[in-house]
Amino acid sequence: MLEGRRIVLVEDDEIMGASLVQRLTLEGAEVQWHRQIARALPAIRTPRKSLDAVICDIRLPDGTGEELYDTLTRTSHPPPFLFITGQGGIDQAVRLIRSGAADYIAKPFDIAAFLTRLATVMRPRADQEMLTETGITAAARTVDRQICEAAARDTPLLIRGAQGLGKLHLARRVHDLSERRAASIIVCNAFRDRVGASELEKAVANVGEGTLVVIGIGKLDVTAQDALIALLAAPRFRLIATLGPHGDRDAQGLRDDLLSLLRSHEIVVPPLADRPDDAVWLAAQLFPGLNARRKEPLTGIAASAEEAIRAHDWPGNGRELRARLIRAVEAAEGSMVMTADLFPERAVDEAMRPLSEVRDGAERAQIMAALDRTRGQVGEAARLLRVSRTTLWEKMQKLGL
């Protein structure tokens, strides 16, 4: 029932937790068991592989399952949550369902009923089996699913998004997954090269039954568009085109019939600014290859640097992230990539940072130190910091911890 599924269990009761891990493993699932919110939060927020579900007790030693779920939904779309609750927590569980959680089950429960409920809330198997190309967030997985669906069709396809989001990579992915993969793929870049009618006709002749990719199709002149429409009247090839993210503005100058044809099958890639967890995931994907070039390899990317990656708005998207990471890996003097390696320009303005930024940075460092000392026990950390647990939770949420 659960073969190959990846599940995070958040449960502090040793007996119940061990029992669930044992049964879920017997069913074929890969289970990560966390007893505290502080440990579960990063495991769910930036998993090594995409997750199928989270099983979460509502009452936990360092907070509530509701606090964990609310924290995750502030910055991302978490996996389906199945909450475990006692009879006294049913009202809270119902409130969570209304907030977007998948389901809840009350204690004590029959294990067969529990497994059925879990299987119901998880995403379809097809979504799990997709290769992760774009990221780990729900928005990225939607793009990956649309790419797989587009590969099964033969109609013209439009991929929209800002520069640096890997639109050409996704176009190649569609070709590689399609029945045309044995044929050629030819790329015409209207941004970089002059792509006129004759160039398009030559490309179509050479591509045969393969895929023609036109980068920046909005830059084609009128004669090139006329030629492309004529070639699409009885095509042997498949057309994949790309445009920027701004809809009509990027399509200005395109023939209405060509634009309508493309928009009938369109995939929009969201910017990294809207997917901070995907920025951290992408850095983790790029790091091993870049690190292998060093004579003395680094041990990884520091947690503080990951938080800086998550907080940056990435106007250059993946292209900017890769450029910064290349420089950071080359320049790092310690054992890990630090924030200053990724964003060296910030050091110039360090002496004139806004007071609010200085205060937030100091609070973040102090909270992280307290959580490390108490091994993630929020209540104990609050006592060390001489604030209430509620105040500490609010600050952790504000600071993205």
Image: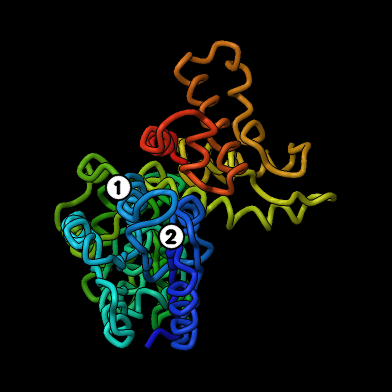
- Quarter holding the N terminus? bottom left
Residues 260 and 151: in front is 151
Nearest to the observer: residue 365 or residue 4: 365
Q: Quadrant of residue 210?
A: bottom left
337 displayed left or right of 94: right
Q: Which mark is nearer the camera, 1 or 2?
A: 2
Q: Give residue 174's position: percent from left, percent from top.
A: 40, 71
- The residue indicated by pointer 1 is 218
As helix, strand or loop, the secondary structure at mark 2 comes to loop
Q: Residue 330: image x %, image y %?
A: 74, 41
**Amino acid beneath label 1:** Gly
- Label 1 and label 2: CA atoms lie apart by 30 Å
Can you see residue 197? no
The front one of 344 and 259 is: 344
Q: Are marks 1 and 2 in contact (CB under 8 Å)?
A: no
Which disc is residue 343 wearing? Answer: none
Name the residue rendered at 58%, 39% in the picture. 304
Above or below 164: residue 259: below
Name the residue at the right extreme. Answer: 295
Task: Identify the residue at image location x=45%, y=67%.
Answer: 13
Q: Which residue is mark 2?
A: 136
Pick whichever of labels 1 and 2 is earlier in the sequence: 2
Tell me which amino acid carries mark 2.
Ile
Q: Quadrant of residue 371?
A: top right
Judge whether residue 384 can be spotted in this image. yes
Disc 1 residue crowd, few under 14, some 14–19, many 20+, Cα 10 Å? many
